[in-house]
Image (tube, rainbow, N blue to C red):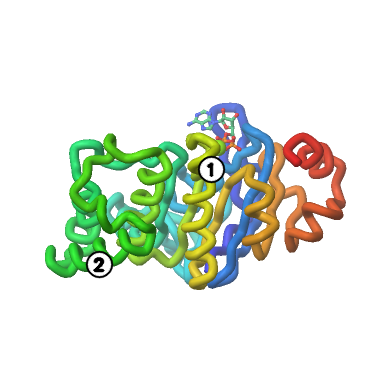
Amino acid sequence: MVNVRGVHKSFGRLEVLRGVDLRVAAGSVTVVLGPSGSGKSTLLRAINHLEKLDRGTVTVDGELIGYRRVGGRLHELKEREVLRQRTSLGFVFQNFNLFPHLTVLENLVEAPIGALGRPRAEARARALELLGRVGLADKADAYPRRLSGGQQQRVAIARALALEPKVLLFDEPTSALDPELVGEVLDVIKDLAAAGTTMIVVTHEIGFAREVADTVVFMDDGVVVEQGPPAAVLDHPQHERTRAFLSKVL
Ligand code: ADP
Ligand code: MG
């Protein structure tokens, strides 16, 4: 479903992604681990073209993201095309990023109506169904500031799902939450995994990775150091850098 090939990205003289390859199968959950600054967020942002690539390609369901190929060369797509492509990639941020001036329901219907042209009634019905799925059917008319962090993040997940994305990208979805609220958000993500949603999840929650991931990817210094099933990477890491990282977080 997602195919990242040879992706390089620098900010000035700092090379943050130094040739990343990653393949994510449809219906699978990939958990990305790695120290702060290793390039995890930049990789997610590169996948949905919030960052331009210096080299390499990203395809989602066979479609090249952010560029089109003309006679062997890549040309960046127009903003409107990129926005259209992004509707197939749901993004859930560490800090929820809900629209504060909109109610929960309005947060969910905004993009389906604006970006996909769905009729309002249909978008509303779908939004209410999704709020039920994340356990927040009774919060449709609340404003985000009235919700706990865990509830806000569940709304953000429902909002991402409202665009019916092919893939959901999570960037440390529980890092900003009080410890007692982490579980309710991870439970929603686990339900999505059980329903066959394709997901890439950057997180430090090792227990979650062990339970839910099909593949664990360990990144350090802009490269994928190793990847494999959770039992292999977490219990029998092959690389010293993975061992050193795990000894700090386990
Ligand atoms: P991680 O998510 O693994 O903590 P990031 O992808 O956020 O890592 O960042 C990797 C490196 O790239 C860090 O050194 C960070 O400071 C740098 N970086 C990220 N975004 C930018 C940017 N827009 N401009 C300059 N440096 C950046
Ligand atoms: Mg990050």
Q: Position of residue 5 (x, y in %)?
A: 61, 58
Within the displayed image, which quadrant is ligand 2 positioned in?
top right
Query: Which residue is more in the foreground, 140 or 246?
Result: 140
Picture quarter with the C terminus: top right
Classify mark 1: residues with Cα within 10 Å, few (<14), some (14-19) or many (20+): many
- Residue type (three-letter) at the residue carrying disc 1: Glu
Report the disc number at residue 42: none
Q: Which residue is pictured at 52% across the width and 40% down the height?
A: 180
Q: Position of residue 67 (x, y in %)?
A: 42, 56
Distance, label 1 to label 2, CA atoms, is 26 Å
- Quarter location, residue 102: top left
The residue pinned by badge 1 equals: 172
Give the number of callouts: 2
- Residue type (three-letter) at the residue carrying disc 2: Arg
Furthest toward the top, the residue is 13
Q: Position of residue 45 (x, y in %)?
A: 48, 45
| Residue 86 appears in the figure | no
Classify mark 2: residues with Cα within 10 Å, few (<14), some (14-19) or many (20+): some
- Quarter location, residue 15: top right
| Residue 217 appears in the figure | yes
Q: Which residue is pictured at 45% across the width and 62% down the height?
A: 69
- Quarter location, residue 136: bottom left
Q: Position of residue 46 (x, y in %)?
A: 50, 48
Query: Which residue is more in the foreground, 154 or 13?
Result: 154
